[in-house]
Amino acid sequence: MNTTVSNPLSYLFHVEQLISRYLLIMIVVIGTFSNLATIIIFRQKHLRSTSCSWYFMSMALCHLLYIDLGCLSRAIAAWAGFHPSLVSSALCKLWSYLTGYLLILSRHFLCLIAIDRWMVTSRNIKLRRCSSRKIAQWLIIIGSIFWALFNIHLLIKFRIEIGDGCSASDDSSYLLFYIILNLCITFVPLTIIIVFSCLLMVNIQTIGRAQALSQTDTSCSVPQNSIQNSHHRINVQFIRLSLIQIGMYIICNLLHVHNVIYAYVSLHTNTSVERKTITIFLNIMGVNLNYLYTSVRNFILFHFF
């Protein structure tokens, strides 16, 4: 009998190799095309004036670079049997820094999308004015600089470890810091996204009730011109797109959330070879799901624009 079938651990390794060799290549090709197309779409004049389009363009650029750096290198490793980051210690540090920076920056932009859509639907005029192209551009610049500086620890503490490849230092204090940091950058964006999505839904219901009341009193109706109607339609499209993107993000990151929690809980626990192999497999699948999200999420966008 084939050992890849009879031995569960060998079977997991076989499945992981198949996914890394074939699925990741497809993700790279589709993700590169879809993210480039997203940037081109949001560069259109009638969309560029909206603050949310700048967040979507920035997130697409992050995902494009993240796929071509992270996903492509994993696919190469699956075929060649050697990860490009293992060429030298400097390349290991640079690869870890760039992939970590792009991942956290893309989540930063997704949070800004959720907050921006909440502000657009707010009845508070001051909040609605905060949803502007100029403020969005400043938040993109400031966020990019902040996370670039914040992730410098990856350049210092990541190195080539025997048996683990390019990974975090085995120093216990840094390992604890790194796991807690992973918990924060996983749960904080998730919390922000869920909270502001709920607030967005509340605002939408409030607007719906207000429109229903205004329609009963024709004397209070004010005609809108074509520019106002067009701007309103674009905002509605962005709201729908944002909610779908947020839902996809939550679904595709559930396994990663489980992996981060398990890593923290089992930090000081001795595990068997079998359990360690299963944990590594789940970690790889969690990362692959994240790559899949960065690749296919844009096809929802093509339906709206």
Image (cartoon, rainbow, N blue to C red):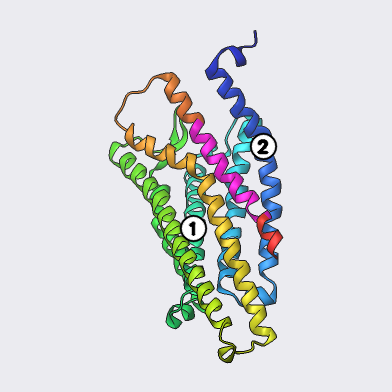
- Closer to us: 71 or 230: 230
Location of residue 187 in the rendering, given as x and y in whole percent from the top left corner:
40, 50
Crowding near pointer 1: few (<14 within 10 Å), some, many (20+)?
many
- Closer to us: 13 or 171: 13
Residue type (three-letter) at the residue carrying disc 1: Leu
Residue at 71% of width from left, 60% of height from top? Answer: 303
In the image, is 116 to the left or to the right of 16?
left
Numbered label attached to residue 23 = 2
Residue at 64% of width from left, 73% of height from top? Answer: 234
The answer to whether residue 255 of the structure is visible from this angle is yes
Extent of the magenta region: 282-299
In this view, which residue lies farthest toward the bottom?
219
- Closer to us: 3 or 157: 3
Q: Answer whether residue 86 is magenta in the image.
A: no
Crowding near pointer 2: few (<14 within 10 Å), some, many (20+)?
some
Residue at 69% of width from left, 84% of height from top? Answer: 226
The residue carrying mark 1 is 105
Residue type (three-letter) at the residue carrying disc 2: Leu
- How far is the residue under mark 2 from the one under mark 1? 25 Å
Q: Secondary structure at mark 2?
A: helix
Numbered label attached to residue 21 = none
Quadrant including the N terminus: top right
Q: Which of the 4 image quadrants contains residue 2?
A: top right
Quadrant including the C terminus: bottom right
Location of residue 87 in the rendering, given as x and y in whole percent from the top left corner:
55, 37
Location of residue 78 in the rendering, given as x and y in whole percent from the top left corner:
62, 31
Q: Is residue 54 above or below residue 111?
A: below
Location of residue 154 in the rendering, given as x and y in whole percent from the top left corner:
42, 48
- Closer to us: 60 or 200: 200
Total label count?
Answer: 2
